Amino acid sequence: MKHYNKMARQAGMTLIELTVVLLVLIGLAGLMMPYVSGFISKTHDSTGASNIAEINGAMERYSAQFQGYPDKLDSLINTDGTLYGADFVSGNGLGGSLLMGPKCLKSQALTSEQAMTLSMSGINTVLEMNATTADATFDAVVFANGVPTTVAMMGTPKVAMLQGTMNCGATATGGLMYSDEALRPILVRTPNTTVNDYVVFGVGQNSSMMGKVMMSAPVHFAQSGAMSAKSKYNRFGVVFEVPKSTIITNKGYCTVSDATNSEVVTAAAEAACVSPLNGTTVTTATGWSWTPITASMQARFAGSVMLMPMIEGLQSAIQRHYDAAAEG
């Protein structure tokens, strides 16, 4: 009996043994923390790239099936005409913004001709945004009597347009987003910022593409709580290429080719070049040619993006994924 009691008292771990085990577990947890953080970042990048590719494919399937692009996209513009949450152009910065990257976008009115190019592409109405919501993603659209409030793409509607500042942090310094070089890794179409403006809409659950080519509008995986779906608009965006108002007015533009630039569109060339549609010929410079654009030209889908602090397209999202993987 004494032997049994002695064995029973020694069946548990001693305080020293418990301390050693706890120290080992703490050490292992410390080693694993950087890897857990890396997993979150890699998940964000890979799922973002996958969702962008899915939306790109869905947009093209919708266009092929319905001969146009989906209607009732999220405008990213509030009822007062400002960018969703805060308008960088008016100097409000990031304060209270429901968009992740307001400095990459600006609220700008289209001309009636530019709006018509979107309407002819199938985008006849866009949804107004709810600036007072406590849920920036899942309650982003204004509802009236249970129906999303829309704005017709007629007249001179305000839209979210890519603008000059690429750095979407607290300052306005940084490279140029609104340049061909900066847009090339973001858009699937080859950008031409001299000829086109680039309009951005959100892909929400009320879009006419839902239930036809997609079952639900994707939400991207935020890396931090400050960028969660409740705090920021975590839907994806689609970019449309709209001819500049001057190009539409002149129904064309001029190009000049030389040994340095294979095709450069310049304001000087446009001013000097006269449209053959008006019965005249180009005589002001050697090598200039007129490229006509018909009055019925439609806006063209240019690619899907994540509305991140720095707007990302498919190529840039994939590159971020591989860069993170290379870093381990």
Image (tube, rainbow, N blue to C red):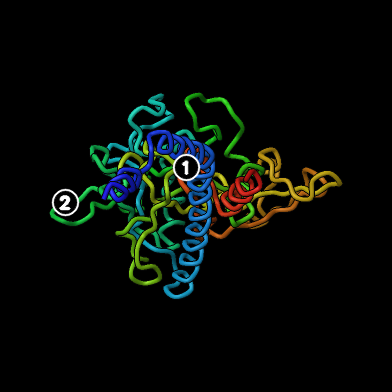
Considering only vertical position in the picture, is 153 above or below 210? above
* Res. 10 in view: yes
Number of numbered discs overlaid on the protein picture? 2
Q: Identify the residue shown where x is 31% and y is 53%.
A: 152
Q: Identify the residue shown where x is 79% and y is 46%.
A: 261
Residue 175 in picture, x, y percent from top left = 61, 32
Residue tagged by mark 1?
Answer: 308
* Res. 185 in view: no
N-terminal-most mark, 2 or 1: 2
Considering only vertical position in the picture, is 9 above or below 302? above
Camera-side residue: 252 or 28?
28
Residue 1 in picture, x, y percent from top left = 26, 51
Mark 1 residue element: loop
Q: What residue type is labelled 2?
A: Ala
Q: Residues within 10 Å of mark 1 (few under 14, many from 20)?
A: many
Horizontally, residue 76 falls left or right of residue 171, namely left
Q: Identify the residue shown where x is 49% and y is 53%.
A: 48
Q: Identify the residue shown where x is 20% and y is 51%.
A: 143
Residue 299 in picture, x, y percent from top left = 50, 57
For this orientation, the residue located farthest to the bottom is 65
Mark 2 residue element: strand
Residue tagged by mark 2?
Answer: 144
Q: Which amino acid does label 1 sit on?
A: Met
Residue 108 in picture, x, y percent from top left = 42, 39
Considering only vertical position in the picture, is 131 above or below 190? above
Q: How far apart are marks 2 and 1 (CA)?
A: 29 Å
Label 2–label 1 contact, CB within 8 A: no
Quadrant in the picture for residue 210: bottom left
Q: Which of marks 2 and 1 is in front?
A: 1
For this orientation, the residue located farthest to the right is 259
